[in-house]
Image (cartoon, helix red, strand yellow):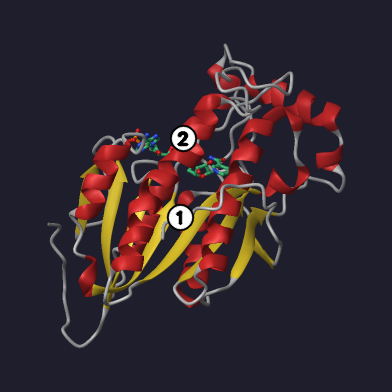
Amino acid sequence: MLPCYNHNMHEPKKLVLVTGASGAIGRDYLEEFSELPEFDCVAIARREFETSADNFTFLELDLLDEAKVNESIQTIDFSVYSEVVFIHSVGMFKYEPNGEPSIDNDEDGIDDEVYKTNIETFVNIIKPLYKRMLQSEEGFKLSLYGMGSVSDKHQIKYWQSYTKSKNILRSIIYNLIQENPEQVKGMMFNVSTVDTEKENELRPNAEKTYWLSGKEIAVATLPFIIKGKFGEWKELDIFKNSPLFEDGYYENLSEIRKRWEQQMKQNENPGENIFEEIDGEVATRLFEAKPPLDGPFFKFR
Ligand SMILES: NC(=O)c1ccc[n+]([C@@H]2O[C@H](COP(=O)([O-])OP(=O)(O)OC[C@H]3O[C@@H](n4cnc5c(N)ncnc54)[C@H](OP(=O)(O)O)[C@@H]3O)[C@@H](O)[C@H]2O)c1
């Protein structure tokens, strides 16, 4: 059984589960939540990581191992919590120059690795977690947050597997809210480029002045996580007003391709990198959008 920290008998506690906790975004969520006394924190990743957060439980877990994930969820004593917040910060991106998946054994048009890391990692947790919520006498509530991209609404063909996967994730969260509006709430946080290890590897020649940091995302979204209403579905864009994204940018496929291929070139002269420190004001845009309803409608009853 997982230990629970700082219990105050008079205040029902909340639990936050953060996946991708070893990545830049997940780690910053963990660090923000570990400062809030009403929350116990569980961090999930496949490897240990450095963090300034203390007072959290680490679950070393491969989220693609369904049986192990199920077993781990069963070790949590949910009866002491009024609410479980699940922040899913895992999901591979692939650039697809021909608009087609590079690995697609099930021929669904979505790259298998992109699908697995974005969707199966989420579903493997939500299945046992949702079941526990329905079975729990105390009736804890569930708050679900997925990380999408600001580009998801534009269906860019060069990362169509990623956008389709994020849309399935939207549908799953949306459908769970529709199924149980008294007990479930959730949002999709659509971010612009983030200063993560993977993004730096993918685009070594990108200028990062207007990239977001994990901390900026965690700080900007925290009030929405804390104050959101049950039964409600909304999306939040988080971005910086970069002059590189003039109106119509996402409609101009040849410009997108040109810019990306320039940014992805391996730099033989690292001294000539155009990297800048990240800067700029964080902006948010809250909106209500019905997600495409083509995602699986999970029935766990
Ligand atoms: N970076 C961006 O610019 C950007 C933009 C828009 C949206 N997003 C979204 O934001 C989220 C986080 O981004 P990111 O770039 O940090 O994502 P990421 O590359 O998927 O990595 C996040 C963490 O996920 C963990 N992870 C991967 N596979 C796992 C598995 N099978 N089981 C358990 N943990 C696993 C990894 O930790 P371990 O190796 O320790 O397991 C890694 O530290 C993702 O959903 C991504 O799609 C990112």
User: Which quarter of the rendering shows the C terminus?
Assistant: bottom left
Q: Position of residue 216 (x, y in %)?
A: 51, 57
Q: Where is residue 174 in the image (x, y as percent from the top left)?
A: 58, 60
**Residue 211 visible in the picture:** no
User: Which quarter of the rendering shows the N terminus?
Assistant: bottom left
Q: Nearer the viewer, residue 252 or 73?
A: 73
Q: Position of residue 136 (x, y in %)?
A: 28, 70
Residue 233 image-quadrant placement: bottom right
Secondary structure type for disc 1: helix
Q: Quadrant of ligand 1?
A: top left
Question: Closer to the camera: disc 1 or disc 2?
Answer: 2
Q: On the picture, is 60 further left or further right than 193?
A: left
Residue 251 image-quadrant placement: top right
- Numbered tag placed on residue 215 in the rendering: 1
Q: Which residue is drawn at 45% across and 55% down?
A: 215
Q: On the picture, is 120 further left or further right than 296?
A: left
- Numbered tag placed on residue 14 in the rendering: none
Secondary structure type for disc 2: helix
Q: Nearer the viewer, residue 227 or 301?
A: 301
Q: Residue at x 61, y 53 (%)?
A: 190
- The residue type indicated by label 1 comes to Lys
Q: Which residue is drawn at 86% across and 48% down?
A: 247
- Residue located beneath label 2 in the image: 117
The residue positioned farthest toward the front in the image shown: 301
Residue 7 image-quadrant placement: bottom left
Indicate yes or no: mark 2 CB to ligand 1 under 8 Å.
yes
